[in-house]
């Protein structure tokens, strides 16, 4: 957690995952993410998140890493998008979501 908190960016190159704890941890710390465009990641961050790359596409990942390093507006957009979804990862939001789901059952 200390390493993640001190990081400027997280790369999550999963090929299959239902919902990565690493994404939730990075979001709650405000750390931007570059991640594969698998459904679990898209489900957590939203379809409009700008930091996706195609599974196993190392060239696209390298391009995104370069952009995050050299293109300040792109990096700012990554950070802003993380901030915009941060509320979804709060304990209060999780409790409310569970309560809503259970009431529907």
Image (cartoon, rainbow, N blue to C red):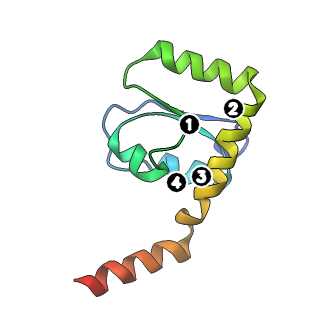
Residue 8, by quadrant, is top right
Q: For label 2, count other residues whose C-alpha is less than 10 Å away and answer few (under 14), some (14-19) or many (20+).
A: some
Q: Are marks 1 and 2 in contact (CB under 8 Å)?
A: yes
Q: For label 3, count other residues whose C-alpha is less than 10 Å away and answer few (under 14), some (14-19) or many (20+).
A: many
Q: Nearer the viewer, residue 15 or 4?
A: 15
Q: As drawn, which residue projects farthest toward the front?
A: 48
Q: Residue at x 35, y 37 (%)?
A: 38
Choose mark 2 or mark 4, whichever is in front. 2
- State the CA–CA distance, disc 2 to disc 4: 21 Å
Q: Is residue 1 visible?
A: no
Instruction: Name the spot of residue 90 as percent of width and height, x first.
Output: 57, 68
Choose mark 1 or mark 4, whichever is in front. 1
Q: State left or right for residue 25 relative to residue 17.
A: right
Q: Name which of mark 3 and mark 1 comes first in the sequence.
A: 3
- For the C terminus, the image quarter is bottom left
Mark 4 — residue?
24
Element under label 2?
Answer: helix
Labelled disc at residue 27: 3
Choose mark 3 or mark 2, whichever is in front. 2
Mark 2 — residue?
74
- State the CA–CA distance, disc 3 to disc 1: 14 Å
Q: As drawn, which residue projects farthest toward the left?
A: 105
Q: Name which of mark 3 and mark 2 comes first in the sequence.
A: 3
- State the CA–CA distance, disc 4 to disc 3: 5 Å
Q: Are marks 4 and 3 in contact (CB under 8 Å)?
A: yes
Q: Nearer the viewer, residue 36 or 17?
A: 36
Element under label 3?
Answer: helix
């Amino acid at each position: 957690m200390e390493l993640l908190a001190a990081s400027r960016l997280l790369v999550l190159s999963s090929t299959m995952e239902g919902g990565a704890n690493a994404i939730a941890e990075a979001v709650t710390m405000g750390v931007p993410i570059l991640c594969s465009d698998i459904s679990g990641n898209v489900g957590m961050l939203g379809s409009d998140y700008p930091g996706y790359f195609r599974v196993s596409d190392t060239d696209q990942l390298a391009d995104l890493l370069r952009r995050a390093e050299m293109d300040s507006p792109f990096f700012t957009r990554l950070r802003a998008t993380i901030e915009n979804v941060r509320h979804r990862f709060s304990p209060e939001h999780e409790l409310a979501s569970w309560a809503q789901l259970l009431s529907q059952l």
